[in-house]
Image (cartoon, rainbow, N blue to C red):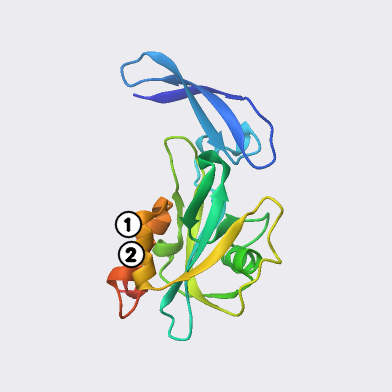
Amino acid sequence: MANVEKVTQITNNRFLNYYELSTVKRTGRKGRYFMASRAANIEALDLSTGENTPDGVVIFSLAGEKKDRVVLVHQYRYPIAGYIYELPAGLIEKNENYREAAVREMKEETGMTFTPLDVDPMYERAFYNSVGMTDESCNLVYGYCEGTISRDGLEESEELDVVLADREEARRILREERVAANCAYMLMQFIHNADDAFSFLEKN
């Protein structure tokens, strides 16, 4: 059975760290595996705690008078040295509720006021983003935005434009642009549920 025998922390950075795992493969052969994590130390890693501790929030929000536009950010990302379409997102601060984090992050990234929906908890629980390389997970939050777009809350490291995309523009983005995976999936929901983009959230 596959297993992790030892963990070595390689970096000690504020937002992201690199770890080397001494592993046992399913055949019994020993090996090495490398992972990134937002955990500050080995004790805080999900593999140490046995828990899925959410690091951030991802926000699927509608805006406009008819609530017929999805809020996106077109953001520069260093790993691809270019821009990519994403849902607004950000890290959860210590002792902060994930819905509070969503409201704060939306204001900081877009200048808009976000009102979360009350949905079945299974839709908002934390899910892993790319578990082959990191234990980062994020809560999903859904709701509506209003107000005027502003860049005043952006940090120096953030370079992005806010896009309020209708369904035609969402189709174009899916066909032609770089898109984050979770954003692409939610754009598909948005496009194919024209009457109510949140219909999949209905409680049974």
The residue carrying mark 1 is: 175
Dot 1 crowding, Cα within 10 Å, few <14, some 14–19, many 20+:
few
Nearest the viewer among 166 and 88 is: 166
Q: Indicate whether 139 appears above or below 9.
A: below
Q: Position of residue 34 (x, y in %)?
A: 50, 26
Indicate left or right for 95 with 144 as reference: right
Q: Position of residue 185 (x, y in %)?
A: 35, 58
Q: In percent of the image, x 57 and y 66: which residue is there?
A: 99
The image quadrant that residue 14 belongs to is top right
Q: Position of residue 7 (x, y in %)?
A: 56, 24
Q: Amino acid at mark 1?
A: Arg
Q: Are marks 1 and 2 in contact (CB under 8 Å)?
A: yes
State the mark number for residue 21.
Answer: none
Total tally of numbered discs in the picture: 2
Looking at the image, the residue that sits furthest to the bottom is 65
Looking at the image, the residue that sits furthest to the left is 192
Q: In percent of the image, x 54 and y 34: which residue is there?
A: 36
The residue carrying mark 2 is: 171
